[in-house]
Image (spheres, grey):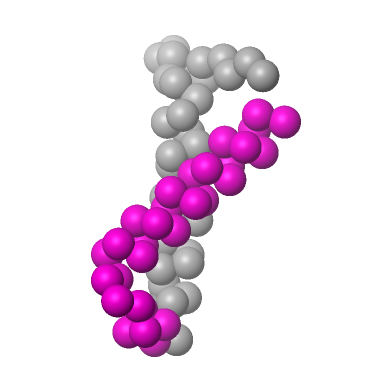
Amino acid sequence: MSFTEINLFGVYVAPISAMMLAAWLMLLVVHRLTARFGLLRLVWHPALFVFAVYVIALSSIILVAAL
């Protein structure tokens, strides 16, 4: 398992930054779907739910990248 820096226009960026961006993009899609179908009304604390989904998405991306 070796995470190396990403060269982004001459600036080296930590790989976790790219993974966080990918997780955030996934979260936007999931958030729009849950808001559209009214599923956010069914959870106790919507902001906490969205944060938990983000953490799950980020953890999944990191686990897949580590394989």
Residue 33 vs residue 53, the one in the foreground: 53
Magenta span includes 31: no
Residue 9 in view: no
The quadrant of the rendering that contains the C terminus is top right
Q: Residue 28 in the image: x percent, y percent?
A: 42, 61
Q: Residue 14 in the image: x percent, y percent?
A: 44, 21
Residue 40 vs residue 30, the one in the foreground: 40
Q: Is residue 52 above or below residue 15?
A: below
Q: Is residue 35 above or below residue 4?
A: below
**Quadrant location of residue 11?**
top left
Main SS type for the magenta part? helix
Q: Residue 59 in the image: x percent, y percent?
A: 52, 43
The region drawn magenta spans 38-67
Residue 66 in view: yes
Residue 25 vs residue 62, the one in the foreground: 62
Q: Residue 16 in the image: x percent, y percent?
A: 46, 29
